[in-house]
Amino acid sequence: MKRVFSNPLVALVAGLCLRLYFVLKFPANSGDTVLYEQIATNWLKHHVYAMTVGGAITPVDLRMPGYPAFLAILYALTGRTGDDARLGVMLAQVGVDLLSCLVIARLAALLACTSGDPTPNKRAYAVALWLAALCPFTANYTAVPLTEVFATFWIALASVALLVALRRVQKPDFLLKSTHLPLGKSVEYSALGAGLVVGLGTLLRPETPLLLVAAAVTFGGLFFQRGNYRRWFWACLAMALGCLMILSPWAIRNMITLGEPQFLAPKNSNLPGELVPYGFMAWEKTWLYRVRDCYLVPWKLNEEAINIEEIPARAFDTVEEKQRVAAILEQYNNDLTLTPEEDAAFAQLARERTSRHPLRTYLWLPAARAAAIWFTPRIELLPVSGHVFPLAQMREDDPVDQEVTSLLFVLNLFYVGLGVWGAGNWRSNPSARPVVAFLALFLVIRTVFLTTLETPEPRYVLVCFPALIALGAQVVARPSDVRLRKLPLAR
């Protein structure tokens, strides 16, 4: 039985079955799905990276080009577009996600290497592969045409490259079996490779360079204690250049087509000439922290009427404030278009609420958003409510719904808790401490960044699961070594 579970093929087959179950049983789509499909179709048929706005083909930059490029290639190969091609898209994503499982296992195996034994740890590899293959949260997103599967793959691959670069600061010949490359430059070469991989990931998700921020800080901790500031500069420059090399064609296209050298997608994803509701978003940040509230307010903006009675009570400090919001929404609901005057009124409300409770806006709500995105059971794509309480009523109304939600909530706690436990074991492998610090720092930076977004969607932390799983695998990486150290010497 041990030999069966240590076989990577068995884990991959189990992972394939889980992903096919989601694809065939719970296929899904979102608003972004239609947007990506429209851009890909226009790109393929009209050779323009554009959306159809008012019946006209309009060039845009509101999404990075990586996922539309994948869709366009698949459309060209299959001769199908849009809804007709979604099953093929999902099946391709299954393959990419299984490849991610292998990369995550490699990350865990390299993380478990000790300074005295640079051989990748087979036990950590097997454990991480099973954890990744059976993770329902990443597997679930193979069943929806979105960027999460590809973003997770590139983050995992970039993490492996950065792990190698960080380990070579201490051991220049780490994983080098030949001396064709100058060992003194092995860190810079690895950093350049990592930058290239991060650049490819950025073509899918614009916030991917946060990984390089965590790496730059960790490189600083390693080089500064050696007094080698120049090597830190060259390593950071290599990462930045690698990333910019990949993004430069996209920036040049934006300069030529749209008149601006835009390396990333615009923060607010607005169409040319479209009003960016800064005031409305500032008001949301004074009360919104759960994804379920997004369905009631922000995701209805400029499309549906917003009902004042559906807005949570925490959005109003006083009755008079609720009446002011109701008056603004009454005007908005007349034509379902937010005007600059209405947006300015929301901005004034945001300033007043922040002035009264600055800690609420800048500390407590961001903390609540962080807790929500990490500990939500991640069932957005499944036909379940996500409600567990009140226990008796939910048990009576729909026991299966409650059980599925509870199970996924516990599984999420398991993965997060195991990752934290693995990070806490950094003392057991001194040579891996810089890499553990890098992965933990990335998780923190990513979480802080997500708390600044207007819509705190739990799916945005899926790219953190490669780090969580790799760290979690360290808990059981070398149990025999631990037991041996605890045994008393024979007399």
Image (spheres, rainbow, N blue to C red):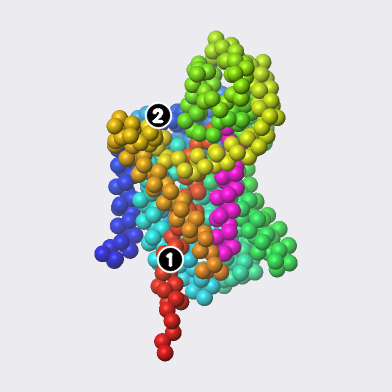
44 sits left or right of 62 in the view: left
Q: What main secondary structure does the magenta stretch of the protein show?
A: helix
Q: Position of residue 136 (x, y in %)?
A: 37, 45
Q: Residue at x 63, y 47 (%)?
A: 244
Q: Residue 316: say if magenta.
A: no
Q: Nearer the viewer, residue 190 or 373?
A: 373
Q: CA distance from mark 2 to mark 1?
A: 44 Å
Q: Residue at x 59, y 24 (%)?
A: 316
In the rendered view, would you say 316 is above or below 444?
above
Q: Position of residue 21 (x, y in %)?
A: 30, 42
Q: Residue at x 39, y 60 (%)?
A: 127
Tell me the magenta residue range: 432-454
Q: Nearer the viewer, residue 29 or 58?
A: 29
Circle 2: residue type: Gly
Quadrant location of the C terminus?
Answer: bottom left
- SS for callout 2: helix
According to the picture, the residue beneath numbered tag 1 turns out to be: 477
Q: Quadrant of residue 354?
A: top right
Check disc 1: other Cα within 10 Å, few if <14, some if 14-19, many if 20+. many
Q: Residue at x 33, y 37 (%)?
A: 402
User: Which residue is most to the bottom?
Assistant: 491
128 sits left or right of 188 in the view: left
Check disc 2: other Cα within 10 Å, few if <14, some if 14-19, many if 20+. some
Q: Quadrant of residue 274?
A: top right
Q: Is residue 43 visible?
A: yes
User: Which residue is most to the top?
Assistant: 334
According to the picture, the residue beneath numbered tag 2 turns out to be: 82
Q: Position of residue 417 (x, y in %)?
A: 46, 53
Q: Nearer the viewer, residue 292 or 381?
A: 292
Circle 1: residue type: Ala
Precedes in sequence: disc 2 or disc 1: 2
In the rendered view, would you say 305 is above or below 14?
above
